Amino acid sequence: MSLNIPFITSPCNSFSTLALSVATVFALSACSQSENTSASAPSTSNCGKVSIANMNWQSAEVLANIDKLILEKGYGCQVELVPGDTVPTATSMTEKGKPDIAPELWLSSVKEPIEKAVKEGRLHIAAAALKDGGIEGWWIPQYVADAHPEIKTIDDALARPDLFPSVENKKRGVIYGCPSGWACQITTAQAFKAWDAKKKGFDLKDPGSAAGLDGAIAKSYQRQEPWLGYYWAPTSILGKYKMVKLDAGVPFDQAEWDRCNSQARCADPKKNDWSKSEVVTVVTDNFKKSGGDANEYLSKRAWGNDTVNQLLAWMSDNQATGEDGARYFLKNNIDVWSDWVSPAIAAKIKGAI
């Protein structure tokens, strides 16, 4: 992603810058074909051992576990989940050919090496993991948007510091920024300068952590109070609380983003939208050649942010693990995942879960 979020809780480690393009990344492992497989055996039995990158943020973790269950129960693969993170996983796949699969790879922070490896035939883009892409920007609660339909853009919101008062100083408005240490902290601070928010009566508040940012949104929702700040999708928070992303009012400019919006020391940032982060599933060349029908599954396996948000919200509410979330998804979203596999494979998976 990259979202300008760190890879600790999201793929946005470089989320916008995470943007990110921010942010998040699933690494999947490839199925290696058994040398002694009979020529008459169906390709689903040829999958063999497969390693899948299990990234350290929630959406990537649950997707890795979904892939594990489907490959094991539907295609007979022997799957191992291996710890992963965007940059080290991409590097390992490129240089060592392992793991076989990265389920949710946010390209923004590794775009150049991945594109080079794809061009050289060492890696392959199986499909878009997130159909909607990774999204970030400044958001307000749905109830604020409903009560104030005139607020549609960042400029509209900045015209109303009285609507988003700071707890420390009621005479000034507050914008919640990105957590300290995340790449999106830079892009959010630069956006604050680009929109001249300080002169318009706003202060930029550091939430301290992702938990602090989530807590601020949850608290505002519980009290039905206005809230304005940086956030990204997909996340469990957006599955629990309806939020509206404000229009930047300007198109995304990559050159300007690279020149200044993503550079902490740049003194003259211009208004700029956040790019939609490209989030893909990547497989090694070995898996592409030996994975059999499992490749077809990965080429179709993509889901929308609303689906992910709802699943992550359930996981957070139930303190569920990635495997718990995967099993819940497979049992309760058959209409979604059955389109990813053949009817015969779908029947095998249903019977196993």
Image (cartoon, helix red, strand yellow):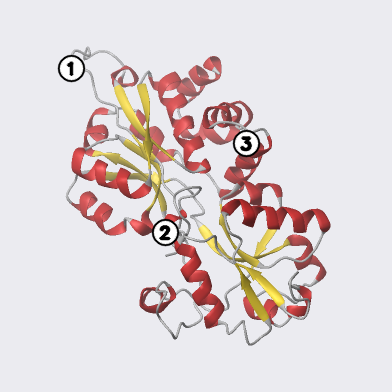
Q: Amino acid at mark 2?
A: Ser
Q: Quadrant of the N terminus?
A: bottom left
Q: Amino acid at mark 1?
A: Glu
Question: Foreground residue, 74 or 183?
Answer: 183
Q: Is residue 103 visible?
A: yes
Q: Is residue 266 shown above or below 114?
A: below
**What residue does disc 1 label?**
35
CA separation in Å, label 3 and label 1? 40 Å
Q: Is residue 47 visible?
A: no
CA separation in Å, label 3 and label 2? 24 Å
User: In x, y percent, where is residue 259?
Assistant: 36, 78
> How many numbered discs sit on the rendered protein?
3
Looking at the image, do the residues carrying marks 3 and 2 touch, with CB atoms under 8 Å apart?
no
Q: Amino acid at mark 3?
A: Met
Question: Foreground residue, 115 or 174?
Answer: 174
Residue extending furthest toward the front: 168
Mark 1 crowd level (few <14, some 14–19, many ≥20, 10 Å Cα): few
Q: Which residue is pictured at 63% across the width and 57% down the height?
A: 213
Q: Which mark is residue 315?
A: 3
Earlier residue among tags 3 and 2:
2
Q: Which residue is pictured at 78% across the width and 76% down the height?
A: 170
Q: Is residue 331 shown above or below 100?
A: above
* For residue 267, side relative to residue 312 (left or right): left
Please, what secondary structure does the residue beneath circle 3 have? helix
**What residue does disc 2 label?**
14
User: In x, y percent, where is residue 196?
Assistant: 58, 85
Please, what secondary structure does the residue beneath circle 1 have? loop
